[in-house]
Amino acid sequence: MKIVVLVKHVPDAAGDRGFAADRTTDRAAVDGRLSELDEYAVEQSLQVIEKAGDGEIVYLTMGPEAAGEALRKALSMGGDAAYHVVDDALHGSDALATSLVLAKALDKIAADGAYDLVVTGMASTDGTMSVVPAMLSERLGLPGLTFAAQLSVEGGAVTIRRDGDDASTTVTAPLPALVSVTDQTGEARYPSFKGIMAAKKKPVTTWTLADLGIDPASVGLSAAWSVVEDASKRPPRQAGTVVTDEGDGGVKLAEFLAAGKFI
Amino acid sequence: MAEVLVLVDHAEGAVKKPTTELLTIARRLGEPSAVFLGKGIDNAVATLGRFGAAKVYVVDAPEVDEFLVAAKAEALAAVVAQASPSAVLVTSSAEGKEIAARLAVKTGSGIITDAVDVAADGTATQSVFAGSWSVQAKVTTGTPIITVKPNAAAPEPAEATPAVENVAVGFSDAAKAARITEVAPRAKSGRPELTEAAIVVSGGRGVGGPEGFATVEALADALGAAVGASRAATDAGWYPHAFQVGQTGKTVSPQLYIANGISGAIQHRAGMQTSKTIVAVNKDSEAPIFELADFGVVGDLFKVVPQLTDEIARRKG
Ligand SMILES: Cc1cc2nc3c(=O)[nH]c(=O)nc-3n(C[C@H](O)[C@H](O)[C@H](O)COP(=O)(O)OP(=O)(O)OC[C@H]3O[C@@H](n4cnc5c(N)ncnc54)[C@H](O)[C@@H]3O)c2cc1C
Ligand SMILES: Nc1ncnc2c1ncn2[C@@H]1O[C@H](COP(=O)(O)O)[C@@H](O)[C@H]1O
């Protein structure tokens, strides 16, 4: 069993995130980290391999130099090796370009030994688009089992539970397949000290666009198929009235709601 | 006039409210045509006409219900190929975004997700970084594909008598790979849909347990509101995940949001920050939720909320 886990390096949501002058995500102003939602993808992949008894996990990211930190973090949780697509021409790539590059990288990884499963997070915590997994499934012709709240691999097939608004559905597909996992799958483990030390020795291969045979003109900000014309910071919400309950908090609240014609 | 496709979100033909909002928005951009996938068109056609659909394309194929998402994307792509629309609008749900993403790859088109407004020239407004920034974006290549959040527009009727056209689709093997083997429908609460409700009453860890949600529900019912929950409450199993508000749950933007026993973590704020009016009840005066509340009560929710519920009943007489 070979699993490729896609991980993204994102600005920490706890920081004051914003846009750079070229209206791309400002990756300098706020410390980066492994997207929390990708930690669930790492965890589920480790569990699949642990259950299977043997197998291999490799990580893949596309992003600037600093994105290597996300790979180290993932490797410290477990797994064997990582691949990092890094190239100045990638700056400002949209989801379509990102999925194109990741698809090519997955093909190159497969050339070294076919994978059974590609596992991703449900969304990146910066873009929160939830589109890259679907685009990859489309590009690679892989069955796409998205938003898994639970996942199991057995007998050459993967089965997930997906919790929708109207129903909870069970979905199954033959391997190889792509699965995106939600934060309902269960807490991700913390890296152990041993894991952190071991991660330093695990191989990380970097690839440029040339290594993947991608024309730099087809990616990056200038090749994006949508443009951000304007980005402005919303004025923060002003704190309003705060009262302390002295036995009449509910009544005071009712007065506020009545003044707003809510009751 | 240019044709604008709206993908219909429905359950067995019962058209969901966000679709009527999309039809309203589509009329700014051109002439709306609805795309209806699956069973139940007879139940849907009147509603689609009432909101201005001049045409309805129907793909009534079992594949769209038997397989996950990819088949729906393929069906929509077939309609796009036939109609050559000037834009495609899809509801910004998990499924809607995935259909849009696949369609973007299939048609070589740019995509914008989670629009909270769309102007006549196709410029979309998005709310990003947990609602702290507002962005204007536009698709520059291919057929603009835009997913639009619920409540982006007030649905406005514009009576039309749609021509119904069946479209036959030959599904590829790739679209038939992820098979749905079981469907367990969720019990209906009888309350308004969380993402559509004008008022949302939410409970968090401070509610203390599943029983505590009865207090939250009682207030919600007094106000005709939907019930929401923080992830702390859904993770603990106190309330179903479908009602979670926040980054990995639903985004709501109601007229009134009442947070009870919720601290106001950034991931929760991401899902409710754009509510018109925010009210918080929390026993900790330092809770970050008070930074965004228009009205806050520092106190025990089990005292404040029942008193409020009673007071609403008293005022209603
Ligand atoms: C990747 C990721 C995604 C996430 N997605 C989401 C999401 O979608 N939605 C979400 O909500 N969270 C999400 N979270 C979790 C989020 O960070 C917080 O942990 C969560 O929102 C906390 O929920 P809470 O406010 O109910 O609990 P707490 O932070 O524990 O707050 C409980 C509050 O209740 C108050 N309280 C206790 N008892 C009473 C009482 N009797 N009366 C009044 N007040 C009382 C306390 O003072 C406290 O402020 C996510 C986290 C991560 C890492
Ligand atoms: N640049 C990237 N490098 C690696 N994985 C990515 C990248 N962008 C997105 N992904 C994967 O796709 C998932 C969804 O991302 P998004 O569509 O951007 O919300 C993430 O959780 C990652 O697993």
Image (spheres, helix red, strand yellow):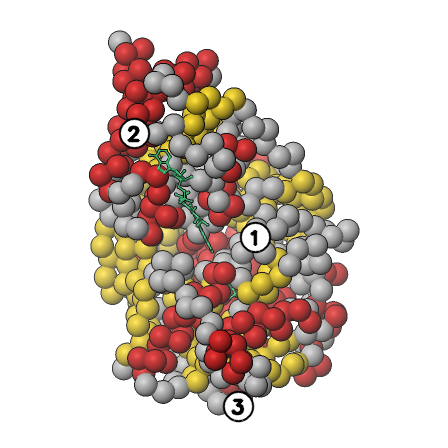
A35, B224: nearer the viewer: A35
Question: Of helix, strand and loop, which one carries label 1?
Answer: loop
Residue A88: x %, y % from top left = 74, 70
A27, A72: nearer the viewer: A72
Q: Determine the chain carrying the residue at label 3.
A: A
Instruction: Check if mark 1's residue and mark 2's residue have beta carbons within 8 Å.
Output: no
Residue A215: x %, y % from top left = 72, 75
Which label's residue is closer to the chain start, 3 or 1? 1
Instruction: Name the residue at 46% across, 13% down.
Output: A259
Three-letter code, disc 2: Phe
Task: Please say whether residue B261 is visible from this viewpoint.
Answer: yes
A184, A173: nearer the viewer: A184
Give the Cα distance between marks 3 and 2. Answer: 61 Å
Return the residue at label 3.
A112
Three-letter code, disc 1: Ala
The vertical placement of B205 against A192, above or below, is above
Task: Please say whether residue B64 is visible from this viewpoint.
Answer: no
Name the mark on residue B108.
none
Return the residue at label 2.
B302
Instruction: Check if mark 3's residue and mark 2's residue have beta carbons within 8 Å.
Output: no
The vertical placement of B103 against B268, above or below, is below
Question: Of helix, strand and loop, which one carries label 2?
Answer: helix
Instruction: Name the residue at 69% across, 71% down.
Output: A65
Instruction: Name the residue at 56% across, 74% down.
Output: A71
Q: Are marks 1 and 2 on the same chain?
A: no
User: The C terminus of chain A lies in which quarter of the figure?
Assistant: top left
Q: Quadrant of ligand 1?
A: top left
Return the residue at label 1.
A13
